[in-house]
Image (cartoon, helix red, strand yellow):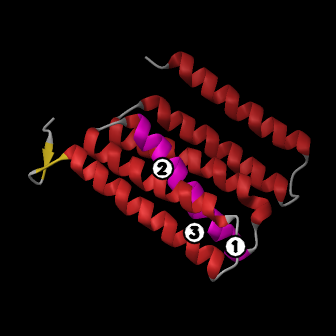
Amino acid sequence: MSGRWFWVRKSTWLIISIIINSFLFVFGSAISAGIFHEYNLWFFIFCFCVGCHLIFKSFLFKYDSACYFGVILFLIGLFYPYTLLLNIQYLYPVFILIAFSFASVFTFYFYKQPYQLFLAFSLFFVAIGLLLYLINIISIAIFLAFVAAGVLLLVIRFFTLK
């Protein structure tokens, strides 16, 4: 692993990323409060900016944990304005589970960790059950059966992994 990327030290790129994301956070927070009058949006802008920084850090230094946490924060910051725009805030827990599922898929794809793929499938399975429960298609008992089945499949796969 080289210490330079395009003839510039990787730590310098990281500092540039911090500066850019800090300005993006301040600008986005000012725009959301000043123009859109959304005073709680600053947290999700912060999640988005920190997620972008961590994804860039995982790209530079090959950190799987930064990739996982960065994708989660990036998607949490991205999904909230989406649910706000479409007026489906009651479905936001489903989007959080999908963020965790996508983070596991990305970590599996880039870092070849097989457990992450099974975690992604289990989380997606539970997210589908939660979606069906929140839109009143299934009852709480069936939703808990979805959760139990997802956890059981994950535990079984964990113990059979080589």
What amino acid type is highlighted by mark number 3?
Ser
Q: Quadrant of the N terminus?
A: top left
Q: What is the magenta segment's predominant secondary structure?
A: helix
Q: Which mark is residue 38?
A: 1
* Secondary element at image label 2: helix
CB contact under 8 Å: marks 3 and 1:
no
Callout 3 environment at 10 Å: few (<14), some (14 to 19), or many (20+)?
Answer: many
What amino acid type is highlighted by mark number 1?
Glu
Residue 51 on image: x %, y %: 47, 52
Q: Nearer the viewer, residue 75 or 25?
A: 25
Magenta range is: 65-86
Q: Which mark is residue 71?
A: 2
* Residues at marks 2 and 1, CA–CA distance in whole angstroms: 24 Å
Residue 83 on image: x %, y %: 69, 68
Callout 1 environment at 10 Å: few (<14), some (14 to 19), or many (20+)?
Answer: few
What amino acid type is highlighted by mark number 2?
Val
The mark that comes first in sequence, 2 or 1, is 1
Q: Residue at x 54, y 57 (%)?
A: 46
**In the figure, 155 relative to 55: above or below?**
above
Residue 117 on image: x %, y %: 48, 37
Query: In the shown orientation, is residue 92 left or right of residue 74?
Result: right
The mark that comes first in sequence, 2 or 3, is 3
Q: Is residue 62 magenta?
A: no
Q: Residue at x 8, y 52 (%)?
A: 7
* Secondary element at image label 1: loop
Q: Nearer the viewer, residue 90 or 52?
A: 52
Write down the residue under mark 3.
Answer: 29
The mark that comes first in sequence, 3 or 1, is 3
